[in-house]
Amino acid sequence: MDKKNKNKILALVLTVLLTGLTGCNDDKKDTKKADDADMFSMNLPAQPKQPQNQPVEPLKAQGDTNTTTEAQKTAVGGSIGKIAYQKSSKSTSRQVAIAELAKGNYYESVVSEVEGFRSTFYHDNIGVATGNGWNVSFQTKTTNSAITKAIGMSPSDQAAIVAISGNKNPSPSLIPRTQISPEQATRAAQVMRDMNFNPVAVRALGQSTWNKLKPNQQAVINYHVYKTGNLNWTHLKADIKACANSQSQADCKRAAEGFTYSYMLNGVRKYDTRSQLYMGALFQDPQAYAYLLGTTAAPADFQAVTSNSGMKIDPSKAADPQIEQQDTFTPLKEQLLEEGKSFDLNVVTPEREAVPEKKKHVGRGTSSNLIGVPMM
């Protein structure tokens, strides 16, 4: 073999060797890339796919109003269609009542004490309520809108509450799963007073009479309108006016005794003597009311002040246990609320306020009396 051919063979061998080395380097680079990738991924769990358009809040006034999802099932009997019962927080309502009394806010105090406090929405006797008995089902859209704005609710909760105004049996899907604080509950009661209850009271009594009443007396009257929706009882109005004009102990005691409330529950008339006791005491003497809250000793004339309250309270002892023992209305009402039963909570007109039925006069020429009367 000549020298020229040897050079060609040598060049060919070198080319083959270089190609092989390059391939090995490429394989190592690929392997390194794979190893680097495994170092960050092999020990990590697989990431679940995120659902699209996942809702952030429960549905409010949207979609089918008659459909309840499994997520909206509550703990009341494990059934769908109810919202969970929440017992009134007596400790919270009492703390607020004491704090508001110390500030001279008599209305806010008695509302908190007598109505109690619940932080979430619950089924009231009819409709749904929260706070200190703020029943959104009975309030107008205008009132509910004003309340939700005044207490600083979110825009979505504002819209949801306004949407169920006047709805006595809203679907659970429409009821916002929100909570309110005691301060918000108090503010809600103030808005309802200023927009609805106080104007009714002032119109019924007249501005001049209203101005003669003491702040604690005005507070009880406003709360009476809260409970009944009006101030139409003739004798109560007359007694309040007499109290305002004289401010005598006798006249104001007579007026205080007119704040009586009874209801038909399960066909039985039940008297709310607890409300009568607190309201009657506050109307006559804030110190007597403060004793009931446990913040001071009873005044010397406490028994005379509360003699017709429907409860017998020994002022030498703590008031709370005595009130609980004699209160037959509140436990029954709470039982019905816990069972989710609807019941009539319209105040029965007191006997002395009942308007006597007019005797029907059957005579000629009155079309309403012509049925069954032979024509002469």
Image (spheres, rainbow, N blue to C red):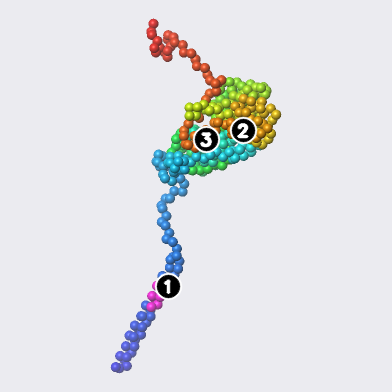
Mark closer to the chain start, 3 or 2: 2
The residue mark sitting in front, 2 or 1, is 2
Return the residue nearer the eye: 291 or 64: 291
Mark 1 neighbour density, 10 Å: few (under 14) some (14–19) many (20 or more): few
Which region is colored magenta?
A: 24-32
Mark 3 neighbour density, 10 Å: few (under 14) some (14–19) many (20 or more): some
Quarter holding the C terminus?
A: top left
Residue for badge 1: 32
Residue drawn 63% across the image and 33% down it? 319
Q: Amino acid at mark 2?
A: Gln
Return the residue nearer the eye: 305 or 148: 305
Residue for badge 3: 334
Under tag 1, what secondary structure? helix
Q: Quarter of the image holding residue 1?
A: bottom left
Q: Is residue 246 above or below residue 325?
A: above
Q: Is residue 247 above or below residue 176?
A: above
Residue 28: say if magenta.
yes
Q: Amino acid at mark 1?
A: Lys
Q: CA distance from mark 2 to mark 1?
A: 84 Å
Q: Are marks 3 and 2 in contact (CB under 8 Å)?
A: no
